[in-house]
Image (cartoon, rainbow, N blue to C red):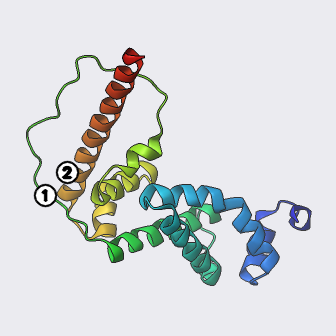
Amino acid sequence: MKILFNHKKDDLLSRLKKQDPVAQKIFYEQNVKRFLSIGKSYVTDLYQAEDCVIKGFCKIFKSIDSFRGEGNLEGWARRIVVNECLNFIKSHKTVFYIDDINPAFLEDFQDEITDSDFNAQELLDQLPDAYRMVFNLYVLEDCSHQEISEILNISVSVSKTQLFRAKEKLRKIYFQQQKNLKNEYLEI
């Protein structure tokens, strides 16, 4: 199938705009794993993340004519998948944003272990939805706090607070996991 388009993105785009099922299949196969990874970073349940990605692809194929060619097609499609995930979270869960920063910092770990063998997705899955949405938009999507505030309909200060708390929570979870691993290792 790839020979059909000679790896030309413009040809693939023009065929997508004509609703060509072969082109849609190729685009889907090229992007589904990456988009599912993105979906999973927002929606912790795999089946719900898959639903968001499928709905995202449907919207991509339905609204492909609105792609104006500014930027790349994959970036435009990625934004649709991210928005689908955010819409899912907003419609299925109550997300609370806390506007004030707790001045008490997390406990310091005297014997911090810097083991780089960890699963980032497992860490992200343990974050509350509000923290995870802001963290993902800021870190993965490279959105500013102003953009995040507009996307999530929150204030800039709430966005900054949620990011701060997400980072601290991730740090705490990571080091607690490392402590547990070290204790398990010592018991052996």
Image point (19%, 62%), residue name: 97
Relative side of 35 to 158, left or right: right
User: Looking at this view, is 103 or 108 the one in front?
Assistant: 108
The reply to whether callout 2 and callout 1 are in contact (CB within 8 Å) is yes
Indicate the position of residue 11 as horizontal and vertical percent values: 81, 70
- Disc 2 residue type (three-letter): Thr
Residue 135 got which mark? none
Q: CA distance from mark 2 to mark 1?
A: 7 Å
Is residue 72 something one can see in this rendering? no
Residue 161 got which mark? 2
Is residue 73 something one can see in this rendering? yes
Residue 99 got which mark? 1
Labels 2 and 1: the sequence-earlier one: 1
Indicate the position of residue 6 as horizontal and vertical percent values: 88, 61
What quarter of the picture does the C terminus occupy?
top left
Image point (8%, 40%), residue name: 103
